[in-house]
Amino acid sequence: MSSKHYVIGDVHGEFDMLMALVAKLPKDAKLIFVGDLVNRGAKSREVIEFVRNNAFAVVQGNHECYILDNANFFLESIEAYREDKSKNFWSRLNGTEVLHSYGLVTEEIDDEVYLVDNPIMIDKLKDDLAWIETLPCYLELGRFEGYDLPIVVTHGSAGDYWHLKDENFEEFKDICQSNREAPSEDASIFNIYGHVIMSNVIVKENHVCVDTGCGKTFDGARLSAYCIETKEIISSK
């Protein structure tokens, strides 16, 4: 029997929750991630390492973009060993947790974040950032039995904008990473995405939303996966 595909929601640095979910999946499962591997949780580096080491499929989420948009400044700051001047931005997005996971900042003292000179981890961060930059904004999986439409995985909802992939790719990419509106009944693809926190995985005729709040602190927040072949939903708890 061939391996089944499991699409996993936003992990947000919660490595332990990811391991709890993976333990419930078949050993030969083909894992696909909807992006937002990082931020909020304490183990962004470990999540990236797990995904990279296993060559799992993943699309780029908006939180990966937040890191890339500011990577050069932070690397310059780290290498110059000076205070992180955009700490307010990173605190707002919980991005300091990413740097914490690489051992590149101290604990916050009086709301100040101080950088740590750690050349090995600086190189590791650079390498991971280069990998993040190569991630696609969508994965076109094609036709599966039991589905009337071809399956596409994105971070944000892109079902109503699939035509823009060829007409205006930059706009399409932005939609893939930021749109929160569920696809309409007229969408031309079956879209599996995250980005929008739901109390439970939402399964409709032409889309699935798999973000169930991993990385958040509300009761019931967990990491979930959707099996394409069986349409089964598995959660970390």
Image (tube, rainbow, N blue to C red):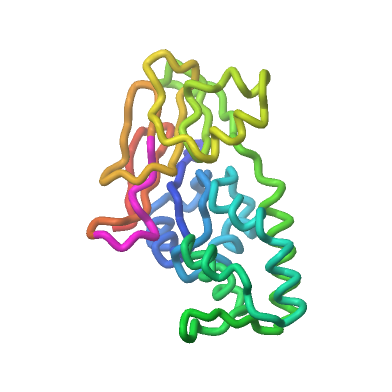
User: Where does residue 130 sit, x and y in percent of width and height?
Assistant: 74, 56
Task: Report the front residue among 78 and 155.
Answer: 78
Q: Position of residue 29 (x, y in %)?
A: 49, 46
In the image, what residue occupies the spot 61% across and 21% down? 164
User: Farthest residue in the top direction?
Assistant: 186
Magenta region includes residue 201: no
The residue at the point 66 percent across, 23 percent down is: 168
Q: Residue at x 54, y 63 (%)?
A: 89
- Left or right of 121? Residue 152 is left
**Residue 2: x, y in percent?**
51, 36
Considering depth in this image, is 3 or 126 the residue closer to the camera? 126
Q: What are the residue bounds of the magenta stretch? A: 209-218
In the rendered structure, the answer to whether residue 39 lies left or right of residue 66 reads left
Query: In screen coordinates, is 89 left or right of 69?
Result: left
Q: What is the tally of numbered marks visible in this picture? A: 0
* Quarter in which the C terminus is drawn: bottom left
Which of the pair 79/138 is nearer the observer? 79
Magenta: main secondary structure = loop
Q: Is residue 210 magenta?
A: yes
Is 235 or 81 nearer to us in this picture? 81
